[in-house]
């Protein structure tokens, strides 16, 4: 079955960095579009970044441009989100999502908490 497992979250001070990973299984990862979303307490889930099946970044939320970088390794079936210069407002649960070629959702991960606090 489809599995997406995020890791790498944690507590970091403002200005710090984290690298999130999402390990995928149960579907054709190399053909899937991959995305990172975040959801802060009491807020809707928002798209943060996206990457094509070939590894080309397709979207960054304005608030993360220049600070975050999405990448993938199709040999390892993993997608990453490098988060630099973290801000308090980046505090959220971060989820990875897989979509097929037609934009249909393949699955979601369970999320990993990122907390940015002094």
Image: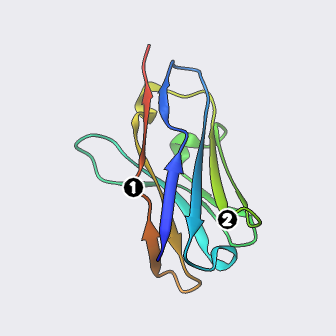
x%, y% of residue 63?
Answer: 52, 41
- The residue wearing badge 2 is 77
**Element assignment for label 2:** loop
* Nearer-N-terminus badge (2/1): 2
Q: Furthest-left residue in view? A: 42
- The label shown at residue 110 is 1
Residue at 51%, 51% (x, y): give it.
6
Whether 41 is drawn above or below 96: the answer is above
x%, y% of residue 108?
Answer: 43, 65
Residue at 69%, 73% (x, y): give it.
53
In the image, taking residue 100 as reference, residue 113 lies left or right, namely: left
Q: CA distance from mark 2 to mark 1?
A: 17 Å
Name which quarter of the figure residue 109 lies in: bottom left
**Element assignment for label 1:** loop
Whether 5 is drawn above or below 8: the answer is below
x%, y% of residue 16?
Answer: 59, 23
């Amino acid at each position: 079955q489809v599995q997406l497992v995020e890791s790498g979250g944690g507590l970091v001070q403002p200005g710090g960095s984290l690298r999130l990973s999402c390990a995928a299984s149960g579907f054709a990862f190399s053909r899937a579009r991959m995305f990172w979303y975040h959801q802060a307490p009491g807020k809707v889930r928002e798209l943060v970044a996206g990457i094509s099946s070939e590894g080309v970044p397709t979207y960054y939320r304005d608030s993360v441009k220049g600070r975050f970088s999405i990448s993938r390794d199709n040999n390892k079936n993993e997608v990453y989100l490098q988060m630099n210069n973290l801000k308090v407002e980046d505090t959220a649960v971060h989820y990875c999502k897989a979509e097929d070629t037609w934009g249909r959702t393949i699955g979601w991960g369970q999320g990993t908490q990122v907390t940015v606090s002094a």
